[in-house]
Image (cartoon, rainbow, N blue to C red):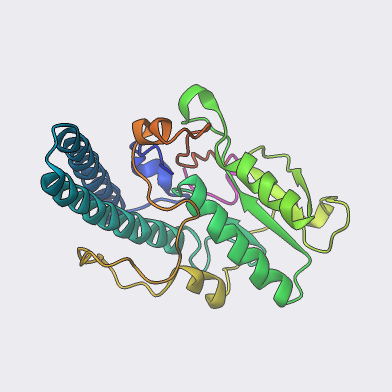
Amino acid sequence: MSHEMSYMGARAFNHEQDSTTEQEYDRLRGLARQEADKRNSAFQRSREAYENGDGALAKKLSEEGKEHGRKMDAYNKQASEFIFRENNANGRVEADTIDLHGQFVEEAEEILEERIKYAKAHGQTHLHVIVGKGNHSVNHVQKIKPRVEQVCQELGLQYSTEENAGRMYINLTGGAATIPPSSAHHYPTGVPAAIAAVSGPDTGAAPAPTGEQPAGRTRAGGQCGTAQDYEQAGEGVLCGYVDCLIVSIDLYTF
């Protein structure tokens, strides 16, 4: 399964960032795209070698492609964890809110599932999820929201779209998703450390991967790459970034 790896830049953040932070996120996603290109090239040459009867070369190139795929996954995982920590740090979101800016669709799904488990285990009754309005997506189509809805349906949870169309409200008790008036707008009070820990400790600029499959989260569907790969795999829908526009100026900085 593939992710559409399009450029995000500053839109990946829900708050004002210095250039160093933005550059680190873009660097990691860029390295992942480079590894995806190398992987695709290796697989293409492997197919050509096989068709020409050179099985040994085909196998060698196939293994090279797999190695580039592992590095691609490692860089994407680092980028996902980096942006999650930045957007969900103390003081940037409320304790009952999770921000999925800058995530690929499957990354967002995995993070959300872990967050729901944590919230329910700690007696939380609801969750606000920033999913994005799709303003920066191709054809302005929301990418994250449909997957969040799918997760809720699979878990038997009721959900609704908030007044800000880039936010969703999920009732974790199984009841109707009626948004309490008191939940409309609050100033951020910070997210618990245990929630931010879903993405691991902040170690600063991440080192280059060693080629081993990273420990921890593994995306459903395996490796991710380009739109072309996704189409070749016969999948019906392309994955991509969540593009958000938060209009509550009392909560967020543009």
> Residue at 83% across / 64% down in the picture?
173
Residue 181 point in image, percent of width and height: 83, 52
Q: Can residue 128 be seen in this snapshot?
A: yes
- Left or right: residue 42 versus residue 232 is left
Quadrant hosting residue 217: bottom left
> Residue at 39% across / 37% down in the picture?
4
- Left or right: residue 20 versus residue 190 is left
Quadrant hosting residue 171: bottom right
State whether residue 139 is above or below residue 238. above
Residue 56 point in image, percent of width and height: 12, 49
Quadrant hosting residue 161: top right
Of the 4 image quadrants, the one containing the N terminus is top left
State whether residue 214 is above or below residue 164. below
Q: Residue furthest front?
A: 53
Which one is nearer the viewer's eye here, 178 or 34? 34
- Left or right: residue 46 versus residue 123 is left
Q: Residue furthest top?
A: 139
Number of numbered labels in the structure image: 0
Residue 227 point in image, percent of width and height: 38, 32
Which one is nearer the viewer's eye here, 164 or 65? 65
Report the span colored magenta: 247-254
- Asked if residue 250 lies in the magenta stretch, the reply is yes
Assign the magenta stretch its main secondary structure: loop
Q: Can residue 100 be seen in this snapshot?
A: no
Residue 121 point in image, percent of width and height: 71, 76
- Asked if residue 54 lies in the magenta stretch, the reply is no
Which one is nearer the viewer's eye here, 120 or 136? 120
